[in-house]
Amino acid sequence: MMRELERSLPTAQIGEGARFVVEANEAELRAVAARLGLDAVRHLRCVFDLRGAEEGAVRADGTLRARVVQTCVISLEPFESDVIEDFRVRFVPAGTESEDIELEADDEIPYEGNRLELGEAAVEQLALALDPFPHKPDAELPVAEQAATGPFAALARLRTRQ
């Protein structure tokens, strides 16, 4: 299965610890933007600091930096914004994921065989970091004028008298 951003790392390369950098090229940026429903992704870089943990798990402390173009939900105009996110996840062998849901626990990402898919993890972290209701910093909701007539006009007048 082809992913938008493939960066596979053999678990044997982690040893006592390893740093791995995922940086998307132009074609990958376009593919990530299409997958996430963004107008564009201008830059995507994710640094993973990896350390082995118990029972084949790998702990990853990461920093995501991205520049994206989204559509403002208020003005419907495109705008650029920076996404900066620090995160921690645990890669675990597939089938060993925790069944308990703990809000404070690290997110678990299952992996098959002996390879971590860090590109997919970077795209997932970007998706989680995006504002679901993006708006330009200077965007304001239009002020709705109250109708002088209509089914709710009498209720509005009563409300203003109180």
Image (tube, rainbow, N blue to C red):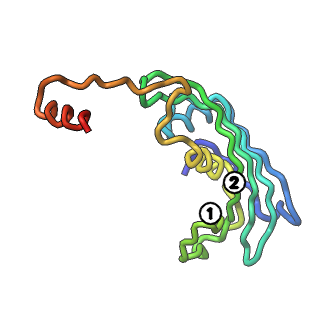
* Residue that protrudes farthest toward the front in the picture: 162
Q: Nearer the viewer, residue 144 or 87?
A: 144
Of mark 2 and mark 1, the one earlier in the sequence is: 2
Q: Is residue 119 above or below residue 45?
A: below
The residue that disc 1 covers is 107
Residue 63: give x, y in percent of width and height.
74, 47
Which quadrant would residue 106 be assigned to in this image? bottom right
**In the rendering, which numbered label is found on residue 131?**
none
Secondary-structure class at tag 1: strand
Left or right of 5? Residue 15 is right
Identify which amino acid the numbered label 2 is placed on. Phe
Residue 156: give x, y in percent of width and height.
21, 34
Left or right of 104? Residue 56 is right
Image quadrant where one finds the C terminus: top left
**In the rendering, which numbered label is found on residue 87?**
2
Badge 2 density bin: few <14, some 14–19, many ≥20, Cα 10 Å:
some
Marks 2 and 1, how far apart at CA: 9 Å
Badge 1 density bin: few <14, some 14–19, many ≥20, Cα 10 Å:
some
